Amino acid sequence: MPFLYSSGVTLHYRIGGRAGKPRIAFTNSLGSDMRIWGTVEQILRYDFEMLFFDQRGHGLSQNVVAPYRLDDLSGDLLMLLDVLGWEKTALCGVSVGGLIAMDAALKDAARVSYLMLFDTAPRIGNADLWAARIETVEADGLEAHADSFLARWFPPSFAEEWPEAWQGWKRMLQATPKEGYMATCAALRDADLTASIHRLDLPVLLLAGTEDISTPPSLVQQMTHDIRDSRFVTVPKAGHLPMIDASEAVASEIRSFLVA
C-alpha cells in the first residue's frame, strides 16, 4: 500500500479502478478512513480510476498532533493529486470530506472537473458543538462514546439489522487516534465556506441520506441557492454515510452524474 510524504505529513493512499478511465478522488468523514468507500469502489471499478486516502490523523496516515485547519486538509488532497499527476479530477467527499473537496475546488478550480458533496455543508455545526466534542474525547477517549457517535452515522435500524457491520465500523472509529480526531474537530470548529461557495463554477452533485441527523437533507439542499450548476438528490432510508448503508444507490448517482 503506497505512502507519500510531503509538507511534513505522511499520507496513506491507494488507487483503484481502471487506469485511463475518468478519475475520482474520494475524501472521508471524521473518524473514518478510506474503507468506507469499499463497496462503492467495487461497483464502479470498471468505469473510473479512483483515488482513496486516509486523511491526516486517521487510518494509516500520520497522526500529526496539532489542531488542523481546513486549509491543511484540502492542501493534503491537492498535494496528492499534484504528486500523482492527476489533473482533471472529480472530487467526492462526505461530511468533513465534503468541506475538504469544496475548499480544494475553490483553491484549484482548473484541476477539478466535477464536485460531489455528500451529507455536508459549508458550515457543519458550530464552535460550541465542536469545542464540546473535543473536550469529551480528550477526557474520555473515543471508545467511551463510540456507540453514540455511530448513532449519528447510521439510521436507527442499522445496529439491529446489521449488528456485525455496526461492530466493524465501531472498531474503525475506535482505532482512530484520539489526537487526529480532536484535531479534525478543530478544523470543523473553525471552517466556514458559506461566503465562498457561490464561486464554485462547475457541475456539483449534492446528495443527502433522508435519515441523516448530522447534516439533514434540508441543510444540504440549501447549497443549491448558492451553487449555480448544482443538482440535489436524496437517498431514501440512508444516514450520514450513505456510501455504507446505501452503496448501490450512491454508486448509481455517481455514475449517472459523471456520465450524463
Image: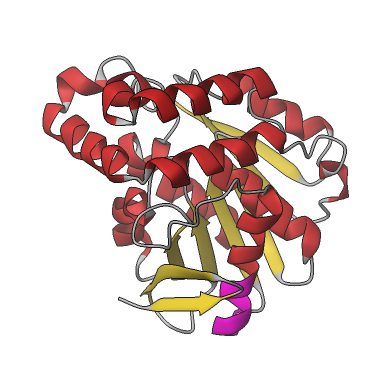
Classify the position of the N terminus by image quarter.
bottom left
Indicate whether residue 20 is drawn in magenta.
no
Magenta stretch?
79-86
Classify the position of the C terminus by image quarter.
bottom right
Q: Nearer the viewer, residue 54 or 215?
A: 54
Q: Nearer the viewer, residue 224 or 192?
A: 192
Image location of residue 34, percent across then percent down: 37, 56
Image location of residue 214, percent across then percent down: 52, 22
Indicate whether residue 81 is drawn in magenta.
yes
Image location of residue 48, percent across then percent down: 45, 70
Residue 239 can be seen, yes or no: no
Q: In this view, does 20 lie above or below 39?
A: below
189 on left or right of 238: right
Q: Quadrant of residue 232?
A: top right
Q: Nearer the viewer, residue 223 or 168?
A: 168
Q: Which residue is drawn at 50% across and 46% down?
A: 253
Q: Is residue 145 above or below residue 175?
A: above
Q: Quadrant of residue 138?
A: top left
What type of secondary structure mainly makes up the magenta span?
A: helix
132 on left or right of 71: left
